[in-house]
């Protein structure tokens, strides 16, 4: 128990140390104007509203693309196919995709959307690229959650005359929903914090607030990359820490909201 408490305490200590250090270094620029204002002078003044909206917009598109596709693949693997060569190949492919470096997904998105499909850098292209990247995580976590559903509940549904589709939608998915949401949370955090997959699909300047999926955009991560690339200038570094603080706060809030929703849904299922 002592070792377990030490492990848990170490994780919290590391987290708090990183967050507090980043916020301390960026506290000079943090404020309402920084969050809700428009940037000026190549990100050295003003706010980060276009980058914040671009980040949220991109993550939303990634989740809307990857979540139903990932859950559908997990249902197919667990309910519609028998264990065999096909399922093994699908799992190997999913695990291999999960191990691919994020910069490779960026190169894939650049080649597919900009070169072959002749699209311009946009929220839609970046969101789909991030969706491809987080898809394996959602597939694997959803598969584990579905497999954890007690077989007695599934048998009870069939005994009452429910079809396979009714059993999946009425018993399996609601019971596995907390585990599925956990996978979505993991994908959300990864999509919000990645730079490499969208570095070629976002613009640095001028800042543009995206109004549609076809619009160009800035994200907090690409803005952070731009600022840190000018490491010899202390003003750039200070702004970079402020952007990092905003990004950390956004990810923590999104995780909290997702986990609160998860707990609420779990409580409703238990009732």
Image (cartoon, rainbow, N blue to C red):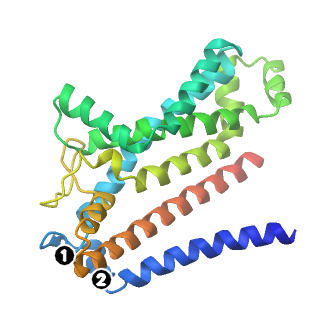
The image position of residue 141, as x and y in percent, is 63, 39
Of pointers 2 and 1, the one earlier in the residue sequence = 2
Q: Say which residue appears at 28% left-offset and 57% top-offset.
A: 222
The tag on residue 29 is 2
Q: Residue furthest bottom?
A: 28
Name the foreground residue: 155 vs 102.
102
Q: Is residue 268 left or right of residue 101?
A: right
* Numbered mark located on residue 44 in the image: 1
Spatial CA span between label 2 and label 1:
10 Å
Residue 148 is left or right of residue 61, and the answer is right
Q: Is residue 271 visible?
A: no
For label 1, the crowd category at 10 Å Cα-Cα, with few meaning under 14, some 14 to 19 and many 20 or more, is: some
Residue 218, disc: none
At x 30%, y 64%, the residue is: 224
The percent coordinates of residue 94 (x first, y second) are 55, 30
Q: Secondary structure at mark 2?
A: loop
* Tally of marks: 2
Up-down relation of residue 118 to residue 226 (above or below): above
Q: Is residue 188 above or below residue 146?
A: below
Nearest the camera: 29 or 180? 29
Residue at (18, 46) in percent of width and height: 215
Circle 2 residues within 10 Å: few <14, some 14–19, many ≥20: many
Q: Which of the two residues, 228 or 112, is positioned nearer the viewer here?
A: 228
* Residue 57 locus on image (x, y percent): 33, 51
Is 182 left, or right, of 228 in this rendering?
right
Q: Position of residue 65 (x, y in %)?
A: 41, 36
User: Height in image: 59 above or below 97?
Assistant: below
Q: Is residue 226 something one can see in this rendering?
A: yes
């Amino acid at each position: 128990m002592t070792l377990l408490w030490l492990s848990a305490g170490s994780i919290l200590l590391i987290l708090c140390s990183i967050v507090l250090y980043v916020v301390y270094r960026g506290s000079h620029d943090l404020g309402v104007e920084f969050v809700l204002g428009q940037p000026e002078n190549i990100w050295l003044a003003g706010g980060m509203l276009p980058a914040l909206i671009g980040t949220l917009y991109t993550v939303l598109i990634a989740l809307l693309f990857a979540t139903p596709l990932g859950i559908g693949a997990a249902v197919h693997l667990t309910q519609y196919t028998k264990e065999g060569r096909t399922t093994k190949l699908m799992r190997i492919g999913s695990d291999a995709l999960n191990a691919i470096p994020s910069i490779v997904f960026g190169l894939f998105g650049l080649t597919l959307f900009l070169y072959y499909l002749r699209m311009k850098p946009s929220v839609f292209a970046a969101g789909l690229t991030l969706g491809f990247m987080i898809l394996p995580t959602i597939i694997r976590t959803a598969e584990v959650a579905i497999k954890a559903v007690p077989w007695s509940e599934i048998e009870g549904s069939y005994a009452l005359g429910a079809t396979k589709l009714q059993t999946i939608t009425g018993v399996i998915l609601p019971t596995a929903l907390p585990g599925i949401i956990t996978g979505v949370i993991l994908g959300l955090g990864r999509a919000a914090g990645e730079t490499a997959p969208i570095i070629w699909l976002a613009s640095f300047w001028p800042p543009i607030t995206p109004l549609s999926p076809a619009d160009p955009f800035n994200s907090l991560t690409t803005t952070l990359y731009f600022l840190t690339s000018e490491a010899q200038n202390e003003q750039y570094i200070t702004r970079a820490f402020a952007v990092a603080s905003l990004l950390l706060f956004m990810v923590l809030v999104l995780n909290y909201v997702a986990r609160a929703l998860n707990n609420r849904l779990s409580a409703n299922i238990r009732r």
